[in-house]
Amino acid sequence: MNNFSQLKIILSLVFSLVLYGIVGFMITEGWSFADSVYMTIITISTVGYNEVHELSTMGRWHVIILILSSLGSVAYAFSYVTQKLLETRYFFRRKMERSIEKLEDHFIIAGYGRMGKKICSILQNNNKKYVVIDKNEQSDDSLQKHELYYLEGDVTDDGILTKAGVSRAKGLVTVVDSVSDNVYCTLTARSLNDSLFIVSRSVSERGTTNLLRAGADKVINPYDAGGHAMAQILLKPSAVEFIELTTGSETLGFVIDEIPIIDSSPLIGKSIKNSKIRDDYNILIAAIKDSDGSINFNPKSDVTLSKGDTLIAFGKLENINALGSLK
């Protein structure tokens, strides 16, 4: 039965119920049309006003039948509305899951607490695709408002990680409260994707050691990181201000970003000078990370770019994106 047919049934029931009540009061009690309408409405709605006239025995039986009939109609209407709400939620979630299935080179955020929300905000500001996994339920309105791909579930469950596209993902951040959950999530994700870049949170040296053993590439202790940042602000305020300018969300458009030299890149085999990166894109190459992981800081202009290199570039965001799109 389609939605229109169900709606017609509900409206027909309501109309028939009201009509039955009006006609019944007019016949059994001899009331006027206005009094019959009034009594029918207050009976169906159960608002509890006094009777307009004293009811006869037949009138009372009529009221009993009217109340029982209205309860059945209300129950049917309630089940219909509930069904529609559940269907709307199901189709919204299913549509979101289908969108997640199409994602590639995205990020997975395991944990949606204060730190997880901050990470999502930064990724969103940088137009990065990401999926959030958390055990707490989020309303559909909230997900639509924040344009969030969200999976409700246990971050240690390989099924939920698979549903989040861990095999196609570029990176994973584990920031749940439990250290053991972070370790298990890292271990599971690593087993599902060897090339996945994993960043985990830990508040202890033991947790850091376990996370690195589980396969995390980087482990961040928020207390160490926060203390270090505050000390640097005290000691080197100007230097920190410059770093915040290039890495913070509130910038003048300048960013530090990494640009991988892929197989099809026209930059392969060219020196920094001949590539005209600075002339054409007004970008400064601050460092080059080789395929073996070594980093050449402030490279000379005659350094040749090779496949597998990663450029650490400083410049305007639009210029960085333009250079990164070269294929």
Image (tube, helix red, strand yellow):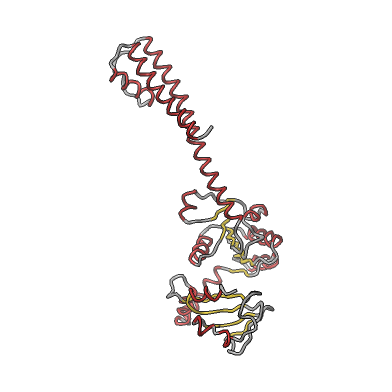
Q: Is residue 211 above or below residue 264?
A: above
The percent position of residue 190, horizontal first and vertical second, equals: 69, 63
Which residue is more in the foreground, 322 or 30?
322
Left or right: where 72 falls relative to 63: right
The percent position of residue 284, horizontal first and vertical second, equals: 52, 83
The part of the image, by quadrant, that contains residue 311 is bottom right
Q: Is residue 5 above or below residue 240?
A: above
The percent position of residue 123, horizontal first and vertical second, equals: 52, 65
Left or right: where 319 falls relative to 56: right
The percent position of residue 283, horizontal first and vertical second, equals: 51, 81
The part of the image, by quadrant, that contains residue 307 is bottom right
**Which residue sits at x=64%, y=56%?**
161
Quarter of the image that includes the N terminus? top right
Quarter of the image that includes the C terminus? bottom right
Q: In this view, does 25 lie above or below 314?
A: above
Q: Is residue 249 above or below residue 55?
A: below
Which residue is more in the foreground, 179 or 260?
260
Left or right: where 291 falls relative to 253: right
Q: Exactly how many numbered labels are in the figure?
A: 0
**Which residue sits at x=54%, y=55%?**
149
Which residue is more in the foreground, 190 or 299?
299
